[in-house]
Image (spheres, rainbow, N blue to C red):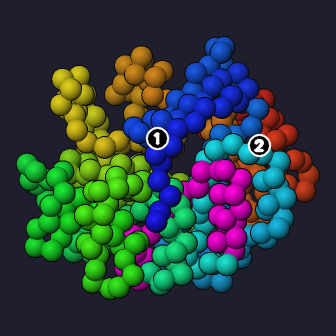
């Protein structure tokens, strides 16, 4: 069974209190002062592999088929400096499904410390999962499904489907209309062709795993974007286009302007549904780079921005490349520091005095 998000917790980090409610998947920070001052990162983007056979032209990690993987013992030594609290780890690479021994080892250790772990995989990988890969995915509390093109008829029908009862747990023509259920069944399934066999048990136990659709601004097909936003009952994370790695020195995608227009129109139209209490979709969220590239702040009131914005990168989060043994503010920052030169906590605290690449 995949690890759920049904629990709740509280802890103090520096001058603020972190609370998480598993019932509504809401995480909040209550500050004791004007500025958020953390003693340790609440969230870490952890690269554990540079091995990936897909060769995406916009891969900001420059991952390759024979890429390296983390040194598990050295990584554990580094991460042991963190407190045993439910800190969030986004595990990625590279393709973590192509380095199973190392992936299992670090994920098992993180879970044993009480940390929260999620990962990102390509949508296409779901349809070629081996049993060992499936068992790895079951360990994660959250699974990000990265989609950059529509290459599967199930996904295309899901995105294109428009129905008044789209959000109920029903089937039509063998296609599950609730994408979260579809993803769960793919991961849980032990026999090919039995993707929808778990529905009754899921409804009975109410232990749905947390899936998030990941799309990159300007890369996801523009003709499908509006339909995805309107039809999705699964949370969507919109990522900025990282001009780093294989995408270094490239311009922003030509569709970025149209992408921004559709996103802003969606935010504008649904603001009124939220105010009227009629908004029944899941969350649509952005990383810091997408907020900047799509000028999302322009679409929000100052009160909305102050309430929803989670802070600059480096204030409560950081990036660790466990393959090369380096820290950085984020995955696209050229300013890297070896973990042989400074401890994790000391490096994180140093980010307060360094404006860096936000």
Residue drawn at x 20%, y 66% is 176
Helix, strand or loop under label 2: loop
Q: Is residue 45 left or right of residue 202?
A: right
> Which disc is residue 83 wearing?
2
Q: Is residue 223 visible?
A: no
Q: Report which quarter residue 211 is drawn in.
A: bottom left
Residue drawn at x 48%, y 76% is 134
Residue drawn at x 35%, y 42% is 284
As drawn, the residue found furthest toward the top would be 33
Helix, strand or loop under label 1: loop
- Mark 2 vs mark 1: in front: 1
Of helix, strand and loop, which mostly describes the magenta segment?
Answer: helix
Badge 1 local density, few (<14 within 10 Å), some, or many (20+)? some
- Residue 190, horizontal then vertical, whole percent: 39, 82
As measured in the structure, the alpha-carbon distance from the residue carrying label 2 to the one carrying label 1 is 21 Å
Q: Answer yes or no: do the residues labelled 2 and 1 have beta carbons within 8 Å?
A: no
Q: Nearer the viewer, residue 75 or 22?
A: 22
Height in image: 234 above or below 285? below
Mark closest to the chain's N terminus, 2 or 1: 1
Q: Nearer the viewer, residue 245 or 77?
A: 77
Q: Is residue 270 left or right of residue 53?
A: left
Q: Is 156 within the magenta? A: no
Which stretch did the figure color magenta? 102-128
In the picture of the structure, the residue carrying the numbered disc 1 is 22
């Amino acid at each position: 069974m995949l690890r759920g998000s049904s629990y709740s917790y509280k802890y103090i980090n520096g001058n603020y209190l972190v609370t998480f409610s598993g019932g509504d998947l809401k995480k909040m920070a209550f500050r004791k002062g004007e500025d958020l001052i953390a003693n340790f990162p609440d969230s870490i983007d952890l690269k554990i592999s540079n091995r990936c056979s897909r060769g995406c032209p916009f891969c900001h990690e420059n991952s390759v088929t024979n890429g390296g993987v983390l040194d598990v013992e050295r990584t554990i030594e580094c991460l042991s400096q963190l407190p045993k609290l439910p800190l969030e780890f986004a595990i990625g690479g590279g393709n973590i499904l192509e380095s199973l021994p190392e992936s299992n080892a670090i994920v098992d250790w993180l879970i044993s410390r009480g940390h929260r772990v999620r990962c990102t995989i390509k949508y296409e990988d779901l349809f070629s999962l081996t049993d060992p890969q499936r068992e790895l995915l079951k360990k994660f509390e959250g699974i990000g499904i990265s989609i950059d093109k529509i290459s599967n008829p199930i996904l295309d029908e899901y995105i294109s489907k428009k129905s008044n009862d789209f959000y109920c747990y029903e089937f039509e023509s063998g296609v599950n209309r609730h994408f979260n259920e579809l993803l769960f069944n793919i991961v849980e399934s032990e026999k090919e062709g039995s993707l929808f066999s778990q529905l009754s048990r899921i409804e009975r136990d109410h232990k749905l795993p947390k899936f998030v659709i990941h799309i990159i601004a300007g890369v996801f097909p523009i003709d499908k974007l509006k339909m995805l936003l309107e039809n999705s009952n699964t949370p969507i994370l919109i990522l900025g286009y990282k001009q780093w790695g294989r995408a270094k020195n490239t311009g922003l995608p030509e569709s970025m302007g149209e992408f921004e227009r559709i996103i802003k129109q969606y935010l504008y139209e649904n603001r009124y549904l939220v105010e009227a209490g009629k908004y029944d979709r899941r969350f649509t969220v952005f990383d810091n780079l997408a907020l900047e590239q799509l000028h999302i702040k322009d679409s929000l009131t100052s009160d909305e921005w102050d309430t929803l914005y989670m802070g600059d990168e480096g204030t409560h989060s950081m990036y660790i490349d466990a393959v090369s043994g380096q820290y950085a503010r984020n995955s696209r920052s050229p300013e890297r520091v070896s973990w042989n030169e400074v401890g994790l906590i000391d490096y994180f605290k140093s980010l307060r005095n360094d404006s860096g690449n936000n």
